[in-house]
Amino acid sequence: MNEELLPVQIADYLQQQTGHAVQVGPLTRFAVGFSWKTYLVPIAGGLPEAGGASELILRLGPSYGLFAPYSAMPEFLSMRSLESSAIPVPKAYWAGDNTETFGAPFLFSQKVNGAAVVPWVPANTPPLDEAYRKSLGAEFIDALAALHSVDWSNQPIAQMAQGINIENAALTNVLYWEKQIERWAMRPYPAAQWAIRWLKDHCPVAPRVAIIHGDYRTGNFLEENGHITAILDWELVHLGDPHEDIGWVSMPMYMGGSPHFCRLTEPEWFYQRYSEKVGFQVSMASAKYYRAFSLLKLAATHMAAARCFEEGRFNDLRMPAMGSQIATCLRQLEKTIESPI
Amino acid sequence: MNNSFPRLIDGMCATLRTEVLSRLDDEFARGQVFGIINLLNTFKLRADWSTDFLSQQVSIQCHALEHVRSLIASVPLAPKVATLTPPQIVSPNELLSLRDSANLEIGKLLDWLASAKENLPEATALAIESELRQSMRREIEIELKSSPRPLFPEMSSGQENPN
């Protein structure tokens, strides 16, 4: 992947897709995201095939990236599946897994206005303004409930079902992440091994099989004036137990020193409002189970970051910083498993 | 090097913050500088001068003093030469390897315990599990005590105090 050639390659690709010449301006790379590379692509005169947009977002999954090898398809299929739903999702225009076009799997999507709320804040950071927090918090809960209520069976994302059902959803995911840990860990972690055994022994039955965002939290949505404008970063999307996203939301790492899930919602309010909107009662046992699972998954992600940097695939200095957080995850993981429901 | 390791790290971090970041506009590049600061902070807590070069220096000094002592042993009114013995140095790589071997062993014992638990006296099984888990917990605690606050907000935004 040659970044200097990228504007020309983008112009060529868009011309092939639209059938007319496209002029691409200088790209801006965003610092956000630890995995895919994200660029703002200015289009001179706008692109009629993208609603006249004068800016597109291009995401590239480099071969040396955190979770490489990548596929753009899960993200593309999920965004396409949710286009007409109540969930605010950017429009996905074009995607591909071939590496001939840009040297990496790619996804072009709509540029949505808004800013990301930072999930990690220094200890002395004042809490979010109360009215702002509540407004955003309500939409944060409602969007998740809406996502978990989508009938995906006739949508493009159904291609990813692979025999998943309410009985095997938990075990399927645990086995998947156990494999990732075997692939990424650079040394033995008996604490992770112990937790995996506990997760296998306590698999809950899901209330339904739903679309799981996989990384639903502050930092992965845009907001403008207290309203969510877009849910982003669908790279870990899959089908599973809705409690999985709830477990992820509830991780202490994203509370930013506040008593609120993702700095936004009181846990009680989250569970109550979500249950009302989604149409089933949140199981506290499943929420605890999936919080533990999420901590294992986060530890695995940090193991991937450490390996990715160690192998010299990526010199992004945020990777070793992530790698240093494995111990934090494992400590929280044990505490979660030991905690009462 | 005559400056202390922690002071050098503090100086590097301060220079990056005041002299480099203040002149850098690119968001991604700023995030990377915060990544460097984050790593330097970790080095401050976990690293120090290499024992290799220090032990080489000490070994030469000890050898020289020992030799001089033997040369002046029979000289009247010669000063008394202190006996210095270089310590046994264990390299970090040896310790890392030992730690991983121990963790592998702990993992094997946990696997064995899961399958053999029912055939063991309850108190024995509990005592084994408690000992293994206590060891895992302590290892993690020690690691956390040597970890600085991660600069994720700064790294992912390129800003000093993101909110």
Image: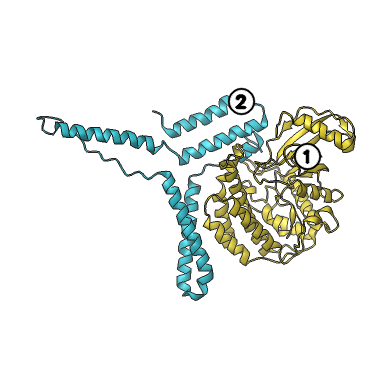
Q: Relative to residue A289, is residue A118 depicted above or below?
A: above
Tell which of A98 and B101 is nearer to you: A98
Q: Is residue A244 above or below residue A264?
A: below
| Residue that carries the numbered disc 1 in the rendered image | A224
Q: Numbered disc 2: what chain? A: B
Counting from the top left corner in percent of width and height, residue A90 is at: 81, 43
Q: Colour of chain B?
A: cyan
Q: Quadrant of residue A218?
A: top right
For the residue labelled by badge 1, is the local secondary structure a helix, a strand or a loop? strand
Q: Is residue B130 left or right of residue A260?
A: left
Image spot of residue A8 (x, y percent): 78, 29
Q: Which residue, as the protein is rendered here, is positioned at the far left?
A: B76
User: Callout 2: 10 Å neighbours few (<14), some, many (20+)?
Assistant: few
The residue that label 2 is drawn on is B22
Q: Amino acid at mark 2?
A: Ser
| Position in image of residue A180 (x %, y %) | 63, 53
Residue at image point 80% right, 40% down:
A109
- Residue for point 59% across, 54% down: A182
How many other residues sit within 10 Å of disc 1, few (<14), some (14-19) or many (≥20)? few
Across and down, in percent, residue A62 comes to 69, 40
Q: Amino acid at mark 1?
A: Glu
Residue under the image location 66 percent in, 26 percent down: B25
Q: Quadrant where the C terminus of chain B lies?
A: top right
Q: Nearer the viewer, residue B93 or A150?
A: B93
